[in-house]
Amino acid sequence: MTRSNSRPINLPSSGRIKDFQLIITGWYEQNSREFPWRKKSSSLYQKIISEVLLQRTRAETVAAFFPAFIFTFPTWKALAMASESELAVFIRPIGLWQRRASILSQLGKEMARRNGRFPRTRPEIEALPGVGQYIANAIQLFSEGKPMPLLDVNMARVLERYFGPRTLADIRHDQYLQQLSLKIVDCDNPQKMNWAILDLAALVCRTDQPKHFACPLNRGCIFLRNISKSNEL
C-alpha cells in the first residue's frame, strides 16, 4: 500500500509525454549501451538476476562481473544449490554482498521450487522472497511484457528534470512519479523505453555535470530552463 501525496497529482499532457517518448527512443537507437542481459539471447533468468545485481551498483561494474556469475550459476536450480555464504563470497567484488546473497539464495530456492515459473498476479510476485516494488516491476516487464517502469533514482532524475519534481523523498510512495513513469513506459516497446531512459541518465542526464547541450530533451527540460533563468538574474 502506497501513501498518498498531499497535493493533487497533475500529470503532463499526453502530447508532452508523446514528445518525450519519440525523442528519447530516437536518441536510444543511436546511443544505446550494450550489456549481456540486453542480448536477444538472454533468458528471463538472466534479466531478473541482472536487476538484482544492478541495484545501487553501476551497470558497467555488473557487466564485467555478470558473465562469470551466469557461468557459475546458470539457472535457478544452480542458484538454489549454492549456499548463502558461497554466494556472498562470489558477489563480494561488486559490493552489498550479504544483502544480495540473502536475496539471491532465497529467491533461487523459491524459483527452483516453482520450476522457474513466476506467479502471474502482483500480490503473489511481491510475496516472493527479496522482491520489492522495483524487482516486481522487472518481473512483470520481462516475463509478461507489461509496461512497468524500472523506476529507480536514475529514471526519477530524468523524469523530474524534464517534467517537474516529486513531492515525497521515497520514490516508491510518490504517486506523481509512480503514475508518470507508468504512462511513459506505456508504449509499443516498454523494455526499450525503460532502457532508453536509464541510458540517458547514465550518459547525459547525470547527477553531477549533466551534459545539457548534448541532451536530446534539452528544449523541453524544466531543469535546464530554471538554470538558464537563474543565470540571467
Image (cartoon, helix red, strand yellow):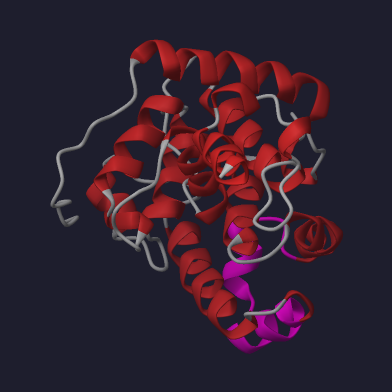
Q: Position of residue 112 (x, y in %)?
A: 50, 59
Which quarter of the picture shows residue 12?
A: top left
Left or right: 77, with 63 as reference point: left
| Residue appearing at x 57%, y 74% in the figure | 100
> Is residue 87 inside the magenta stretch?
yes
Question: Foreground: 144 or 157?
Answer: 157
Q: Residue furthest top?
A: 15
The stretch in magenta equals 73-92
Question: Foreground: 66 or 224?
Answer: 224
| Residue appearing at x 43%, y 16% in the figure | 16
Q: Is residue 26 above or below residue 58?
A: above
Left or right: 217, with 226 as reference point: right
Q: Is residue 122 above or below residue 67?
A: above
| Residue appearing at x 50%, y 53% in the figure | 152
Left or right: 30, with 201 as reference point: right
Q: Position of residue 155 (x, y in %)?
A: 53, 45
Which quarter of the picture shows residue 2?
A: bottom left
Q: Is residue 197 above or below residue 49?
A: above
Asked if residue 120 can be seen in this view, the reply is: no
Q: Position of residue 36 (x, y in %)?
A: 79, 44
Q: Is residue 39 above or below residue 99?
A: above
Majority secondary structure of magenta residues? helix
Quarter holding the C terminus is top right
Question: Foreground: 211 or 198?
Answer: 211
Which quarter of the picture shows residue 128?
A: bottom left
